[in-house]
Amino acid sequence: MDSGKIVTGIIAGAAMGVLFGILFAPDKGSKTRHKISKGSNDALDDLKSNFDDLLHSLNERLKTAREEVVNFYEKGKEDVKDGVTKAKNELGQNP
């Protein structure tokens, strides 16, 4: 069976479960709407928190990568200078 059909079936089943749960809920409509509203607000808060955590993590990784690039560049620059000096010394161009 195609995995797309399986995912579609799972999503459709979950949607039907939510629909029947709301329709046959023992609480009054206002209480049910309040529960749904609170649940969606909680989910939104979780999403915001996870997004903030992701941004913080990416920012830290970017800082680390930048530091590594700068260090690599500086090390390469020093290695080139040392190589040029060594080559000049071997060719007898430095006193």
Image (cartoon, rainbow, N blue to C red):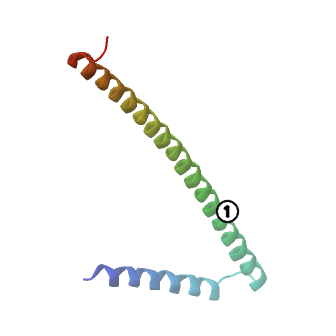
* Residue type at numbered disc 1: Asp
Q: Which residue is mark 1?
A: 45
Q: Residue at left 31%, top 21%?
A: 85
Q: Position of residue 94 (x, y in %)?
A: 31, 15
Q: Position of residue 44 (x, y in %)?
A: 65, 67
Quick one: label 1, few (<14), some, or many (20+) residues within 10 Å? few
Q: Could you tell me if residue 24 is visible in this image?
A: no
Tell which residue pokes out farthest to the left in this image: 91
Quarter the C terminus occupies: top left
- Horizontally, residue 13 falls left or right of residue 86, namely right
Q: Is residue 16 above or below residue 80?
A: below
Quarter the N terminus occupies: bottom left
Q: Is residue 64 above or below residue 52?
A: above
Q: Secondary structure at mark 1?
A: helix
Q: Residue at left 38%, top 79%?
A: 7
Tell which residue pokes out farthest to the right in this image: 30
Image quadrant in which you'd find residue 2: bottom left
Q: Residue at left 46%, top 42%?
A: 65
Front one among 69 and 13:
69
